[in-house]
Amino acid sequence: MTNKFAAALFDLDGVVFDTEPQYTVYWGGVMRKFRPDTPGLEYTIKGSTLTRIFEDFLPDVPEEYDNIIKGLDEFERNMDYPFVEGFEEFVRDCRKNGLKTAIVTSSNKPKMESVLKKRPEIKELFDAILMSEDFEFSKPHPDCYIKGAERFGAKPEDCLVFEDSFNGLKSGCASGGVVVGLSTSNPEDAISEYCDIVIPDYKGIDYNTLISRL
């Protein structure tokens, strides 16, 4: 295991921001309305793009897509975006240690516009922001993390991937990156098989402490 990585690639919700409980409320309502046959889909879809959610989980209600998107956009405009505990200090320490940093998210451009309005400091914490429009395939396909590494001229195996959802963790693993799982959305024992290490948040962890545990 290298002790010097080229980049740190972060998913957004549940990794940078502690927002997953809010999304569970929104998508729980949608799925109970349109997919009452399969309870718990709001958890299954975590890490998926809207396109994949519609194609794989809501294929029978295309007439409702516009309303679902409008509802989601309104929900996101009014969301809170609290950082996962210790995140700001951790990402700044990564940058001090020479790592490039990027958000690699299944969220789209309208969502990121809402994020940046409420959290403009994000621009100072990341060298790049990659969104769903930048990828050909949705998580759990590795496309997004391969492209994240390529953005910095790095190999995936020289990148730290920070994820919380099963789809995201599988994407990071498939890319060849070194995967740091956050147990913000799922318990440690459920995600550990997809991670090189699991952390609850970033509190009390700096870059050197983290890589010493890998």
Image: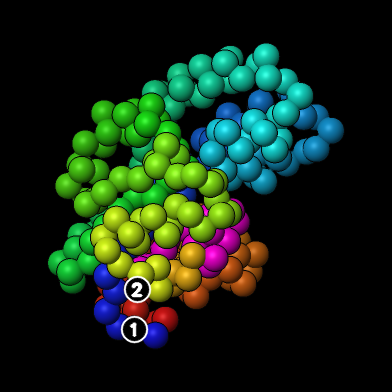
Given the image, on which type of amino acid does mark 1 rest?
A: Thr
Q: Earlier in the sequence, mark 1 or mark 2?
A: 1
Residue at left offset 40%, top offset 68%: 156
28 is higher (above) or lower (below) than 9: above
Q: Quadrant of residue 129?
A: top left
- Can see residue 164? no
Q: Is residue 173 in the magenta section?
A: yes
- Can see residue 161? yes
Where residue 71 sits: x, y (%)?
53, 18
Where residue 9 sits: x, y (%)?
36, 59
Q: Residue furthest right?
A: 37
Determine contact: label 1, label 2, CB under 8 Å: yes
- Quickly name the residue at label 2: 158
Q: Residues within 10 Å of mark 1 (few under 14, many from 20)?
A: few
Q: Which mark is residue 2?
A: 1
Where residue 66 sits: x, y (%)?
57, 16
Quadrant of the frame with the C terminus: bottom left
Q: Residues within 10 Å of mark 2 (few under 14, many from 20)?
A: some
Camera-side residue of 13 and 2: 2
Say left or right for 48 vs 152.
right
Q: Quadrant of residue 206?
A: bottom left
